[in-house]
Amino acid sequence: MVKPGEYNVLKVIKEKPIGVFLDDGDIGILLPKRFVPQGTKIGDELKVFLYHDGEDRIIATTQKPFGVLGDIVKLKVVSTNEQGAFLDWGLMKDLFIPRSRQVSFMRPNGEYLVKIMMDEQTGRLYATEKLEPFLSNKELSVKELELVDLLVYRKSDLGYVVIINNKHTGLLHFNEVYRPIKIGDRFAGFIKKIYSVNESGEYMIDVAAGRPGYNRVEDESAKVLRLLKENDGYLPYNDKSSPEEIYSFFSMSKKTFKMATGKLYRERKIEFTQTGIKLLE
């Protein structure tokens, strides 16, 4: 069974001047000629994304959309009309968001966080800006120290509210932010702390960017070594450098930098100087 809104691996069953047709158990799904990989022949299996064209037919493409069914992504508005807006999601055909699914009036060239949905009756894909019904912390699918995908949702008094794995919400505290971030930014992180259920019956979650604990230091130590080798064995950064200087160059917090360089010093791989750190042979 083929699945619109997702990637499918389908076999080529026939070739036509307009493209090739892929096996769907019926008459086949068209992959237009401009998207057919060079050298494709009957019997080959292709990984394609499926969606409905303007005539309500399922069509295939080898283009990669910015998101698939169920994803929450930041998309730009291409155009608007009385019925809604059209979003650029990386395909030839724009993604439609009905006016009723918008939180506020969308404007051309504006960027908005939306969830990619499917109309159960027609099977057509659309977007919604109303995300809250799809986010819940009542039943968690994550645990402390687990690596997760983080999407910046909105700013709060304490930090940034982030969406975790497209399912839950968590808080990235300001003291855990070491670079400029904005709504819609996506990056890897981990569950730092899960708190008891609050009055609304939901868990509270604190998150952090990067990897947890010792593994994080291991990764950052390797980065410091690489940067030293790329800069003739010397870098003008040490404990006296400001957190902003360290993050600008290493993309890590000063605390993580001190842990990473301390580990390298104990392993006799670097030495500290008055002005920076030096690689030892």
Image (cartoon, rainbow, N blue to C red):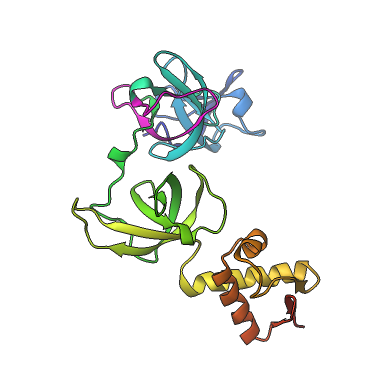
Give the percent coordinates (x, y) of residue 257.
Answer: 60, 71
Q: Quadrant of the N terminus?
A: top left
In this view, the residue in front, 51 or 197, is: 197
Name the quadrant containing residue 222. Answer: bottom right
Q: Residue furthest right?
A: 232
Q: Quadrant of the C terminus?
A: bottom right
Residue 195 at least partly seen: yes
Q: Is residue 163 left or right of residue 183?
A: left
Q: Residue at the location (54% across, 28% down)?
A: 91
Tell whether position 102 is magenta.
yes
Q: Is residue 46 left or right of residue 202?
A: right
Q: Residue at the location (55% across, 70% down)?
A: 256
In this view, the residue in front, 14 or 185, is: 185
Q: Is residue 231 left or right of residue 126?
A: right
Give the percent coordinates (x, y) of residue 150.
Answer: 44, 51
In this view, the residue in front, 165 or 33, is: 165
Q: Which residues are magenta?
A: 101-122
Q: Say above or below: 174 vs 87.
A: below
Q: Say above or below: 46 vs 136.
A: above
Residue 9 at least partly seen: no
Q: Residue at the location (56% across, 51% down)?
A: 180
Q: Say above or below: 26 vs 279.
A: above
Tell whether position 219 is magenta.
no
How many dots with numbers? 0
Give the percent coordinates (x, y) of residue 214.
Answer: 49, 75
Give the percent coordinates (x, y) of residue 65.
Answer: 52, 34
Q: Residue at the location (49% across, 56% down)?
A: 188
